[in-house]
Amino acid sequence: MSDVVTMDDLSNEEILSILEDSVRLVPVARGAVHLPLLEGKVLANMFYENSTRTRMSFETAMKRLGGSVLNFSSIGTSVAKGETLYDTMQMVEGYADIAVIRHPRQGAAQYSADAIDIPILNAGDGAGNHPTQTMLDLFTIMEAHGTIEGLNVVLVGDLRYGRTVHSLSHALIRFGAELTLVSPETLMMPDEIVNDLRSSGATISESTDLVAAIPDADVIYMTRIQKERFPDEDEYAKVAGIYMLGAKDMNDAKDGMIVMHPLPRVSELHPSLDSTVNARYFQQAFNGVPTRMALLCRSLGVEIPEEVKK
Amino acid sequence: MSEMRRVTAICNGTVIDHIPAGHALQVIKMLRIDTHRSNPVSLVMNVPSDKMGRKDLLKIEDLELNQEELDRLALISPNASVAIIRNYGVAEKRVVELADELVNVARCTFSNCITQNPREPLPQKLILYSRDPIEVRCYYCGKRQDLGDIIDNLI
Protein backbone atom coordinates (compact mmCIF):
# COMPACT_ATOMS: atom_id res chain seq x y z
CA MET A 1 0.00 0.00 0.00
CA SER A 2 1.09 3.53 -0.61
CA ASP A 3 -0.44 4.94 2.58
CA VAL A 4 1.89 6.25 5.25
CA VAL A 5 0.00 6.11 8.55
CA THR A 6 2.81 5.11 10.89
CA MET A 7 6.54 4.64 10.36
CA ASP A 8 5.83 0.89 10.34
CA ASP A 9 4.42 1.38 6.85
CA LEU A 10 7.98 2.03 5.65
CA SER A 11 10.85 -0.46 5.73
CA ASN A 12 14.33 0.78 6.63
CA GLU A 13 15.32 0.43 2.96
CA GLU A 14 12.32 2.51 1.89
CA ILE A 15 13.13 5.19 4.48
CA LEU A 16 16.71 5.45 3.22
CA SER A 17 15.52 5.53 -0.37
CA ILE A 18 13.05 8.35 0.42
CA LEU A 19 15.82 10.27 2.21
CA GLU A 20 18.08 9.89 -0.85
CA ASP A 21 15.26 11.11 -3.10
CA SER A 22 14.77 14.06 -0.73
CA VAL A 23 18.42 15.08 -1.09
CA ARG A 24 18.04 15.19 -4.87
CA LEU A 25 14.85 17.24 -4.55
CA VAL A 26 16.39 20.03 -2.43
CA PRO A 27 17.02 22.34 -5.44
CA VAL A 28 13.42 21.77 -6.56
CA ALA A 29 12.19 22.53 -3.04
CA ARG A 30 14.13 25.80 -3.14
CA GLY A 31 12.60 26.73 -6.45
CA ALA A 32 15.97 26.67 -8.25
CA VAL A 33 14.93 23.80 -10.52
CA HIS A 34 11.58 23.34 -12.27
CA LEU A 35 10.52 19.70 -12.10
CA PRO A 36 6.77 19.23 -12.72
CA LEU A 37 6.62 15.54 -11.81
CA LEU A 38 3.13 15.81 -10.31
CA GLU A 39 1.54 17.99 -12.98
CA GLY A 40 -2.20 17.31 -13.20
CA LYS A 41 -2.31 15.66 -9.76
CA VAL A 42 -4.46 17.05 -6.95
CA LEU A 43 -3.63 16.87 -3.24
CA ALA A 44 -6.37 17.25 -0.63
CA ASN A 45 -4.95 18.87 2.50
CA MET A 46 -7.43 17.68 5.16
CA PHE A 47 -6.68 19.64 8.32
CA TYR A 48 -9.10 19.08 11.20
CA GLU A 49 -6.58 20.72 13.53
CA ASN A 50 -4.38 23.77 13.26
CA SER A 51 -1.12 23.54 11.40
CA THR A 52 1.35 25.97 9.93
CA ARG A 53 4.44 24.12 8.79
CA THR A 54 2.95 20.78 7.92
CA ARG A 55 0.13 22.23 5.88
CA MET A 56 2.25 24.83 4.12
CA SER A 57 5.15 22.51 3.39
CA PHE A 58 2.82 19.92 1.86
CA GLU A 59 1.27 22.66 -0.23
CA THR A 60 4.67 23.99 -1.32
CA ALA A 61 5.90 20.45 -2.04
CA MET A 62 2.90 19.71 -4.25
CA LYS A 63 3.03 23.05 -6.07
CA ARG A 64 6.81 22.98 -6.67
CA LEU A 65 6.25 19.62 -8.36
CA GLY A 66 3.56 21.08 -10.61
CA GLY A 67 0.53 19.67 -8.76
CA SER A 68 -2.39 21.49 -7.23
CA VAL A 69 -3.86 21.57 -3.75
CA LEU A 70 -7.33 21.59 -2.21
CA ASN A 71 -7.22 23.04 1.26
CA PHE A 72 -9.82 21.84 3.73
CA SER A 73 -10.46 22.99 7.24
CA SER A 74 -13.16 21.56 9.47
CA ILE A 75 -14.40 25.03 10.41
CA GLY A 76 -17.28 26.22 8.26
CA THR A 77 -17.64 22.96 6.34
CA SER A 78 -20.02 20.01 6.48
CA VAL A 79 -17.94 18.61 9.37
CA ALA A 80 -19.36 21.39 11.53
CA LYS A 81 -22.78 20.03 10.55
CA GLY A 82 -21.86 16.61 11.92
CA GLU A 83 -20.54 14.81 8.86
CA THR A 84 -18.62 11.64 9.68
CA LEU A 85 -14.98 11.27 8.70
CA TYR A 86 -16.04 8.32 6.55
CA ASP A 87 -18.43 10.45 4.50
CA THR A 88 -16.00 13.35 4.14
CA MET A 89 -13.32 11.00 2.88
CA GLN A 90 -15.69 9.47 0.30
CA MET A 91 -16.07 12.94 -1.12
CA VAL A 92 -12.32 13.60 -1.07
CA GLU A 93 -11.71 10.43 -3.02
CA GLY A 94 -13.75 11.91 -5.83
CA TYR A 95 -11.88 15.20 -5.84
CA ALA A 96 -8.22 14.35 -5.27
CA ASP A 97 -5.47 11.85 -6.14
CA ILE A 98 -3.91 11.81 -2.67
CA ALA A 99 -4.91 13.12 0.77
CA VAL A 100 -2.97 14.40 3.74
CA ILE A 101 -4.91 14.28 6.98
CA ARG A 102 -4.43 15.82 10.40
CA HIS A 103 -7.14 15.05 12.94
CA PRO A 104 -7.53 15.50 16.71
CA ARG A 105 -8.71 11.91 17.12
CA GLN A 106 -6.18 9.11 17.28
CA GLY A 107 -6.57 6.48 14.57
CA ALA A 108 -8.20 8.92 12.12
CA ALA A 109 -5.53 8.39 9.46
CA GLN A 110 -5.78 4.59 9.53
CA TYR A 111 -9.56 4.92 9.50
CA SER A 112 -9.37 7.17 6.42
CA ALA A 113 -6.96 4.79 4.71
CA ASP A 114 -9.48 1.98 5.24
CA ALA A 115 -12.38 4.14 4.10
CA ILE A 116 -11.02 5.05 0.64
CA ASP A 117 -8.56 3.85 -1.98
CA ILE A 118 -6.47 6.95 -2.73
CA PRO A 119 -3.20 7.17 -0.76
CA ILE A 120 -3.38 8.72 2.72
CA LEU A 121 -0.46 10.46 4.39
CA ASN A 122 -0.88 10.90 8.14
CA ALA A 123 0.01 14.44 9.20
CA GLY A 124 -0.79 13.81 12.88
CA ASP A 125 -3.65 11.97 14.59
CA GLY A 126 -4.29 13.08 18.19
CA ALA A 127 -1.34 12.02 20.31
CA GLY A 128 -0.67 9.17 17.87
CA ASN A 129 1.70 9.34 14.92
CA HIS A 130 3.23 11.96 12.71
CA PRO A 131 5.39 10.00 10.28
CA THR A 132 6.07 12.74 7.71
CA GLN A 133 7.51 14.86 10.53
CA THR A 134 9.68 11.88 11.44
CA MET A 135 10.97 11.68 7.87
CA LEU A 136 12.03 15.32 7.89
CA ASP A 137 13.57 14.86 11.34
CA LEU A 138 15.61 11.88 10.13
CA PHE A 139 16.62 13.89 7.07
CA THR A 140 17.82 16.75 9.30
CA ILE A 141 19.83 14.41 11.52
CA MET A 142 21.39 12.64 8.52
CA GLU A 143 22.19 16.00 6.95
CA ALA A 144 24.11 17.06 10.07
CA HIS A 145 25.73 13.79 11.14
CA GLY A 146 25.74 11.63 8.01
CA THR A 147 24.35 8.72 10.02
CA ILE A 148 21.89 7.88 12.78
CA GLU A 149 23.59 4.80 14.16
CA GLY A 150 25.30 5.32 17.51
CA LEU A 151 24.06 8.89 17.99
CA ASN A 152 22.79 9.94 21.40
CA VAL A 153 19.49 11.69 20.75
CA VAL A 154 17.99 13.56 23.70
CA LEU A 155 14.22 13.98 23.42
CA VAL A 156 12.99 16.76 25.69
CA GLY A 157 9.67 18.09 26.96
CA ASP A 158 6.22 16.66 26.41
CA LEU A 159 6.97 13.02 25.71
CA ARG A 160 3.55 11.88 26.87
CA TYR A 161 1.27 13.70 24.46
CA GLY A 162 3.82 14.66 21.80
CA ARG A 163 3.07 12.55 18.73
CA THR A 164 6.23 13.83 17.03
CA VAL A 165 8.49 12.16 19.58
CA HIS A 166 6.43 8.95 19.54
CA SER A 167 6.98 8.41 15.83
CA LEU A 168 10.55 9.67 15.92
CA SER A 169 11.71 7.49 18.81
CA HIS A 170 10.59 4.30 17.03
CA ALA A 171 12.41 5.32 13.85
CA LEU A 172 15.61 6.33 15.65
CA ILE A 173 15.77 2.96 17.38
CA ARG A 174 15.37 1.17 14.05
CA PHE A 175 18.51 2.92 12.83
CA GLY A 176 20.54 2.23 15.96
CA ALA A 177 20.41 5.53 17.86
CA GLU A 178 20.51 5.71 21.66
CA LEU A 179 17.76 7.68 23.33
CA THR A 180 17.80 9.89 26.39
CA LEU A 181 14.27 10.85 27.41
CA VAL A 182 14.04 14.07 29.43
CA SER A 183 10.63 15.13 30.72
CA PRO A 184 8.80 16.11 33.90
CA GLU A 185 7.37 13.08 35.71
CA THR A 186 3.84 13.92 34.54
CA LEU A 187 4.84 14.02 30.88
CA MET A 188 7.01 10.92 30.61
CA MET A 189 6.89 8.75 27.49
CA PRO A 190 3.95 6.28 27.84
CA ASP A 191 5.02 2.90 29.24
CA GLU A 192 3.71 0.99 26.27
CA ILE A 193 5.99 2.95 23.94
CA VAL A 194 9.05 2.66 26.21
CA ASN A 195 8.40 -1.09 26.57
CA ASP A 196 8.10 -1.49 22.80
CA LEU A 197 11.35 0.40 22.29
CA ARG A 198 13.18 -1.61 24.94
CA SER A 199 11.88 -4.91 23.62
CA SER A 200 13.42 -4.07 20.25
CA GLY A 201 16.80 -3.84 21.99
CA ALA A 202 17.03 -0.09 22.39
CA THR A 203 19.34 1.69 24.82
CA ILE A 204 17.14 4.19 26.63
CA SER A 205 17.71 6.32 29.70
CA GLU A 206 15.07 8.46 31.36
CA SER A 207 15.72 11.64 33.33
CA THR A 208 14.17 14.91 34.41
CA ASP A 209 17.44 16.86 34.08
CA LEU A 210 18.11 18.55 30.74
CA VAL A 211 21.34 20.30 31.74
CA ALA A 212 22.99 17.01 32.69
CA ALA A 213 22.10 15.54 29.30
CA ILE A 214 23.71 18.29 27.18
CA PRO A 215 27.43 17.24 27.23
CA ASP A 216 26.78 13.74 25.82
CA ALA A 217 24.16 14.73 23.28
CA ASP A 218 24.60 14.54 19.51
CA VAL A 219 21.08 15.82 18.97
CA ILE A 220 18.79 17.66 21.39
CA TYR A 221 15.23 17.44 20.19
CA MET A 222 13.16 19.99 22.10
CA THR A 223 9.36 19.95 22.12
CA ARG A 224 6.73 22.38 23.27
CA ILE A 225 4.64 21.53 26.30
CA GLN A 226 1.29 21.44 24.51
CA LYS A 227 -1.27 23.45 26.42
CA GLU A 228 -4.12 22.13 24.25
CA ARG A 229 -3.49 18.52 25.35
CA PHE A 230 -3.87 19.24 29.07
CA PRO A 231 -7.18 18.44 30.72
CA ASP A 232 -6.85 21.45 33.06
CA GLU A 233 -4.92 24.69 33.29
CA ASP A 234 -3.34 24.01 36.71
CA GLU A 235 -1.64 20.87 35.49
CA TYR A 236 -0.26 22.83 32.53
CA ALA A 237 1.01 25.67 34.76
CA LYS A 238 3.03 23.20 36.85
CA VAL A 239 5.22 22.16 33.92
CA ALA A 240 5.11 25.09 31.46
CA GLY A 241 8.56 26.59 30.97
CA ILE A 242 10.35 23.80 32.82
CA TYR A 243 12.98 23.28 30.09
CA MET A 244 14.73 26.14 28.32
CA LEU A 245 17.81 26.29 26.13
CA GLY A 246 19.77 29.41 25.24
CA ALA A 247 23.09 30.22 23.56
CA LYS A 248 25.08 29.90 26.80
CA ASP A 249 23.92 26.30 27.28
CA MET A 250 25.79 25.43 24.09
CA ASN A 251 29.16 25.94 25.85
CA ASP A 252 28.89 22.43 27.31
CA ALA A 253 27.85 20.82 24.04
CA LYS A 254 29.93 18.50 21.86
CA ASP A 255 31.18 19.77 18.51
CA GLY A 256 28.52 19.19 15.89
CA MET A 257 25.65 18.84 18.36
CA ILE A 258 22.42 20.10 16.82
CA VAL A 259 19.28 21.46 18.45
CA MET A 260 16.01 20.55 16.73
CA HIS A 261 12.40 21.47 17.42
CA PRO A 262 9.23 20.64 15.45
CA LEU A 263 8.01 24.22 16.15
CA PRO A 264 6.12 26.28 17.13
CA ARG A 265 8.26 27.12 20.14
CA VAL A 266 7.05 29.04 23.16
CA SER A 267 9.77 29.68 25.72
CA GLU A 268 11.82 26.48 25.46
CA LEU A 269 14.26 27.89 22.88
CA HIS A 270 15.61 31.35 23.66
CA PRO A 271 16.09 33.57 20.55
CA SER A 272 19.80 33.82 21.51
CA LEU A 273 20.12 30.22 20.33
CA ASP A 274 19.01 31.05 16.78
CA SER A 275 22.38 32.41 15.67
CA THR A 276 24.46 29.53 17.10
CA VAL A 277 25.92 26.78 14.89
CA ASN A 278 23.83 24.32 16.87
CA ALA A 279 20.41 25.71 15.95
CA ARG A 280 18.86 23.59 13.23
CA TYR A 281 15.11 24.10 13.70
CA PHE A 282 14.47 26.53 10.84
CA GLN A 283 16.49 24.34 8.47
CA GLN A 284 14.45 21.42 9.84
CA ALA A 285 11.22 23.26 8.93
CA PHE A 286 12.51 23.78 5.37
CA ASN A 287 13.45 20.10 5.16
CA GLY A 288 9.75 19.33 5.34
CA VAL A 289 9.47 20.40 1.71
CA PRO A 290 11.93 17.99 -0.01
CA THR A 291 10.96 15.06 2.24
CA ARG A 292 7.25 15.60 1.63
CA MET A 293 7.95 15.91 -2.08
CA ALA A 294 9.62 12.52 -1.99
CA LEU A 295 6.75 11.03 0.03
CA LEU A 296 4.10 12.44 -2.35
CA CYS A 297 5.97 10.99 -5.34
CA ARG A 298 6.35 7.61 -3.69
CA SER A 299 2.68 7.36 -2.75
CA LEU A 300 1.61 8.44 -6.24
CA GLY A 301 4.00 5.96 -7.85
CA VAL A 302 6.04 8.68 -9.57
CA GLU A 303 9.77 8.02 -9.91
CA ILE A 304 12.25 10.78 -9.17
CA PRO A 305 14.99 10.99 -11.81
CA GLU A 306 18.47 9.88 -10.67
CA GLU A 307 19.82 13.29 -11.54
CA VAL A 308 17.88 16.46 -11.02
CA LYS A 309 19.38 19.02 -13.41
CA LYS A 310 18.81 22.71 -13.81
CA MET B 1 -13.33 -36.58 36.34
CA SER B 2 -14.59 -36.13 39.88
CA GLU B 3 -15.19 -32.41 39.32
CA MET B 4 -17.42 -33.23 36.33
CA ARG B 5 -19.83 -34.89 38.73
CA ARG B 6 -20.26 -31.79 40.83
CA VAL B 7 -23.09 -30.82 38.49
CA THR B 8 -25.36 -33.05 36.50
CA ALA B 9 -24.71 -33.97 32.89
CA ILE B 10 -26.56 -31.81 30.37
CA CYS B 11 -28.66 -33.16 27.55
CA ASN B 12 -27.87 -30.53 24.92
CA GLY B 13 -25.60 -27.50 24.99
CA THR B 14 -21.98 -26.50 25.50
CA VAL B 15 -19.43 -27.45 28.14
CA ILE B 16 -16.48 -25.12 28.56
CA ASP B 17 -13.67 -26.73 30.49
CA HIS B 18 -10.21 -25.52 31.54
CA ILE B 19 -11.20 -21.94 32.22
CA PRO B 20 -8.51 -20.29 34.39
CA ALA B 21 -9.63 -20.49 38.04
CA GLY B 22 -11.80 -17.55 39.04
CA HIS B 23 -12.56 -16.43 35.48
CA ALA B 24 -15.88 -18.23 34.86
CA LEU B 25 -17.95 -15.16 35.69
CA GLN B 26 -15.97 -13.12 33.16
CA VAL B 27 -16.54 -15.82 30.56
CA ILE B 28 -20.27 -15.67 31.24
CA LYS B 29 -20.17 -11.93 30.80
CA MET B 30 -18.12 -12.11 27.62
CA LEU B 31 -20.48 -14.65 26.10
CA ARG B 32 -23.37 -12.42 27.18
CA ILE B 33 -25.27 -15.34 28.63
CA ASP B 34 -25.86 -13.32 31.79
CA THR B 35 -28.18 -10.75 30.26
CA HIS B 36 -29.62 -11.69 26.93
CA ARG B 37 -30.44 -15.35 27.44
CA SER B 38 -32.48 -17.59 29.66
CA ASN B 39 -30.47 -20.79 29.22
CA PRO B 40 -29.76 -22.70 32.41
CA VAL B 41 -26.06 -22.36 33.27
CA SER B 42 -24.09 -24.44 35.78
CA LEU B 43 -20.90 -22.90 37.05
CA VAL B 44 -18.10 -24.70 38.87
CA MET B 45 -15.25 -22.66 40.28
CA ASN B 46 -11.82 -23.47 41.66
CA VAL B 47 -11.98 -27.23 41.24
CA PRO B 48 -8.72 -29.21 41.24
CA SER B 49 -7.19 -29.85 37.83
CA ASP B 50 -4.16 -31.97 36.85
CA LYS B 51 -3.31 -29.57 34.04
CA MET B 52 -4.01 -26.25 35.71
CA GLY B 53 -3.91 -26.79 39.45
CA ARG B 54 -7.33 -25.17 39.78
CA LYS B 55 -9.85 -24.40 37.09
CA ASP B 56 -13.38 -23.25 36.41
CA LEU B 57 -15.98 -25.01 34.31
CA LEU B 58 -19.26 -23.98 32.69
CA LYS B 59 -22.17 -26.00 31.40
CA ILE B 60 -24.60 -24.02 29.28
CA GLU B 61 -27.77 -25.81 28.34
CA ASP B 62 -29.43 -25.60 24.94
CA LEU B 63 -26.79 -23.33 23.44
CA GLU B 64 -24.10 -24.28 20.94
CA LEU B 65 -21.35 -21.68 20.81
CA ASN B 66 -20.35 -20.53 17.34
CA GLN B 67 -16.88 -19.44 16.24
CA GLU B 68 -17.56 -15.74 16.75
CA GLU B 69 -18.54 -16.43 20.36
CA LEU B 70 -15.44 -18.57 20.82
CA ASP B 71 -13.31 -15.63 19.64
CA ARG B 72 -14.62 -13.64 22.56
CA LEU B 73 -13.90 -16.47 24.96
CA ALA B 74 -10.33 -16.80 23.74
CA LEU B 75 -9.42 -13.36 25.07
CA ILE B 76 -9.66 -14.45 28.70
CA SER B 77 -9.54 -18.21 28.39
CA PRO B 78 -7.37 -19.08 25.39
CA ASN B 79 -6.73 -22.67 26.48
CA ALA B 80 -10.31 -23.60 27.27
CA SER B 81 -11.70 -26.81 25.79
CA VAL B 82 -15.19 -26.62 24.41
CA ALA B 83 -17.46 -29.58 23.85
CA ILE B 84 -20.82 -29.42 22.11
CA ILE B 85 -23.19 -31.84 23.78
CA ARG B 86 -26.09 -33.47 21.97
CA ASN B 87 -28.27 -36.07 23.61
CA TYR B 88 -25.88 -36.41 26.59
CA GLY B 89 -22.89 -37.20 24.36
CA VAL B 90 -19.98 -35.13 23.04
CA ALA B 91 -21.03 -34.39 19.46
CA GLU B 92 -18.21 -32.00 18.61
CA LYS B 93 -15.11 -30.59 20.16
CA ARG B 94 -14.36 -27.02 19.27
CA VAL B 95 -11.01 -25.40 19.52
CA VAL B 96 -10.70 -22.00 21.10
CA GLU B 97 -8.27 -20.12 18.97
CA LEU B 98 -7.39 -16.52 19.50
CA ALA B 99 -7.88 -14.79 16.17
CA ASP B 100 -5.30 -12.25 14.94
CA GLU B 101 -8.10 -9.76 14.44
CA LEU B 102 -11.29 -9.23 16.45
CA VAL B 103 -13.82 -7.50 14.25
CA ASN B 104 -16.88 -5.99 15.89
CA VAL B 105 -16.27 -7.90 19.12
CA ALA B 106 -15.56 -4.93 21.38
CA ARG B 107 -15.20 -1.17 21.14
CA CYS B 108 -11.83 0.48 21.62
CA THR B 109 -11.69 1.76 25.19
CA PHE B 110 -9.60 4.85 24.40
CA SER B 111 -11.73 7.96 24.77
CA ASN B 112 -9.99 9.82 21.92
CA CYS B 113 -10.08 7.04 19.34
CA ILE B 114 -11.76 7.88 16.02
CA THR B 115 -14.11 4.93 16.54
CA GLN B 116 -15.68 6.62 19.59
CA ASN B 117 -18.08 8.40 17.25
CA PRO B 118 -20.92 5.86 17.05
CA ARG B 119 -21.94 7.20 13.65
CA GLU B 120 -18.63 6.24 12.00
CA PRO B 121 -19.59 3.18 9.95
CA LEU B 122 -16.36 1.15 9.63
CA PRO B 123 -16.16 -1.94 11.87
CA GLN B 124 -14.54 -1.89 15.28
CA LYS B 125 -11.29 -3.77 15.00
CA LEU B 126 -8.91 -4.98 17.68
CA ILE B 127 -5.70 -6.75 16.75
CA LEU B 128 -3.74 -9.31 18.67
CA TYR B 129 -0.38 -7.68 19.31
CA SER B 130 1.06 -10.50 21.40
CA ARG B 131 -0.17 -14.01 22.29
CA ASP B 132 1.86 -14.61 25.41
CA PRO B 133 1.07 -12.60 27.41
CA ILE B 134 -2.12 -11.68 25.57
CA GLU B 135 -1.97 -8.09 24.42
CA VAL B 136 -4.71 -6.57 22.32
CA ARG B 137 -4.54 -3.16 20.65
CA CYS B 138 -6.97 -1.07 18.67
CA TYR B 139 -6.28 -1.46 14.94
CA TYR B 140 -6.97 2.22 14.29
CA CYS B 141 -5.47 4.15 17.21
CA GLY B 142 -2.95 1.55 18.39
CA LYS B 143 -3.89 1.86 22.08
CA ARG B 144 -3.38 -1.17 24.27
CA GLN B 145 -6.69 -2.53 25.58
CA ASP B 146 -7.14 -3.64 29.14
CA LEU B 147 -8.76 -7.09 29.01
CA GLY B 148 -11.00 -6.22 31.94
CA ASP B 149 -12.25 -3.15 30.07
CA ILE B 150 -12.92 -5.15 26.91
CA ILE B 151 -15.55 -7.11 28.78
CA ASP B 152 -17.36 -3.86 29.55
CA ASN B 153 -17.11 -2.70 25.93
CA LEU B 154 -18.43 -5.71 24.08
CA ILE B 155 -20.58 -4.91 21.10
Image (cartoon, coloured by chain):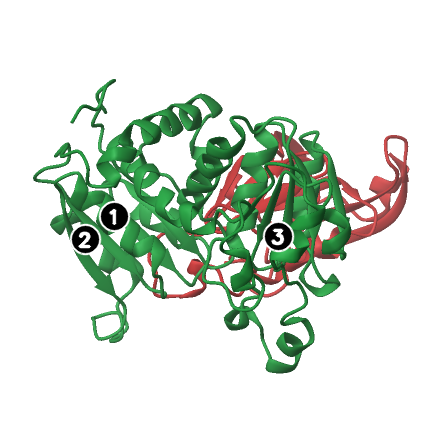
Chain colours: A green, B red
Marks 3 and 1, how far apart at CA: 29 Å
Marks 1 and 2, how far apart at CA: 8 Å
Q: Chain of mark 1?
A: A
Q: Are marks 2 and 3 on the same chain?
A: no
Q: Nearer the viewer, residue B15 or B153?
A: B153
Label 1 SS: strand
Instruction: Judge the density around disc 3: few (<14), some (14-19), many (≥20) Cα neighbours within 10 Å.
Output: some
Residue behind mark 2 = A92
Quick check: B153 left or right of A104?
A: right
Residue found 27% across the figure and 68% down from its top:
A74
Residue behind mark 1 = A99
Residue found 54% across the figure and 72% down from its top:
A227
Q: Work out which quarter of the rendered image holds the N terminus of chain B and state it.
A: top right
Q: Chain of mark 3?
A: B
Res. B46 visible in picture: yes
Quick check: B70 left or right of B124?
A: right
Residue behind mark 3 = B145
- Where's residue A140, x and y in %? 46, 38
Q: Nearer the viewer, residue A51 or A273?
A: A273
Q: Nearer the viewer, residue A248 or B144?
A: A248
Amino acid marked by disc 2: Val
Amino acid marked by disc 3: Gln
C-beta proximity under 8 Å, tags 1 and 2: yes
The residue lying furthest to the left in this view is A40
Which of the two marks, 3 or 1, is nearer to us in this view?
A: 1
Which of the two marks, 2 or 3, is nearer to us in this view?
A: 2
Residue A160 sits above or below residue A151 on the image: below
Where residue A202 sits, quadrant-wise, is top right
